[in-house]
Amino acid sequence: MPMNKKSGHVSCRKTGLKLHLIGAMVLSVTAGGLAQAEPLPKEAVLPLALAQKAAAAGLAKCEEGGYKVSVAIADRGGNLKVLLRGDGAGPHTTDSSFRKAYTAASLRRSTLHLAELITKVPGIQALREMNDRILILGGGLPIELEGEVVGGIGVGGAPGGHLDEACAAAGLASLGNP
């Protein structure tokens, strides 16, 4: 096949027509396939304003108790959406709060409930090892909006998982979730 040195295009008169016909057939099959495709799934998302509101309410609850904590919000995919580190909170609290939020969003359960469950059912202790983001300590709760889990809230730094969880619950309550 001869090549045009100026344009860099390959010139082939006999196969050029064939390529155009094949391209047209592929395009018509693809276009027809797109028109008949299934509708895209729709899923609720956690708006940033609500994530910020929940995090601020969780932090305020812990500050009322004198606890120096961090509060994290993860979206449904486990991505960090909001992170608030309270004054005086230890450096480890940013990581633990995010990992609790991630765990609650991913496993769709309270991390305190999961911690209690693991002690009762030793066969599921492998949950701790699923990946390096999972943290099964009290303080993480799933965030549900209109019956759909859209993320998780995690609190780290209070002297006990039950206290972290109470602050996370205050964050949920600010959204109208019990």
Image (spheres, rainbow, N blue to C red):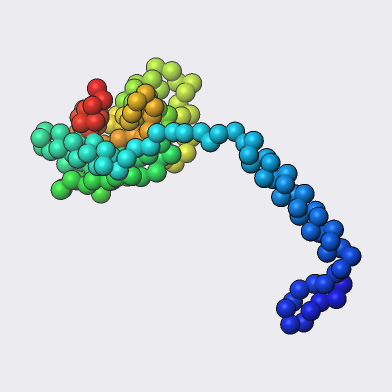
| Position of the C terminus by quadrant | top left
Q: Is residue 166 left or right of residue 108?
A: left
Please count the marks in the image. 0
The residue at the far top in this view is 120
Quarter of the image for residue 69 reads top left
The residue at the far right in this view is 14
Nearest the viewer among 45 and 129 is 45
Provide residue 29's location: percent of width, then percent of height. Answer: 73, 44
Q: Is residue 34 above or below residue 119?
A: below
- x 76%, y 73%: residue: 9
Provide residue 106's location: percent of width, then percent of height. Answer: 42, 33
Provide residue 27's location: percent of width, then percent of height. Answer: 71, 50
- x 47%, y 39%: residue: 131
Quarter of the image for residue 136 reads top left
Q: Is residue 148 left or right of residue 178?
A: right
Provide residue 54's location: percent of width, then percent of height. Answer: 24, 36
Q: Taking the image as drawn, is residue 96 in sight?
A: no
Q: Is residue 48 above or below residue 178?
A: below
Nearest the viewer among 99 and 142 is 142
Quarter of the image for residue 162 reads top left
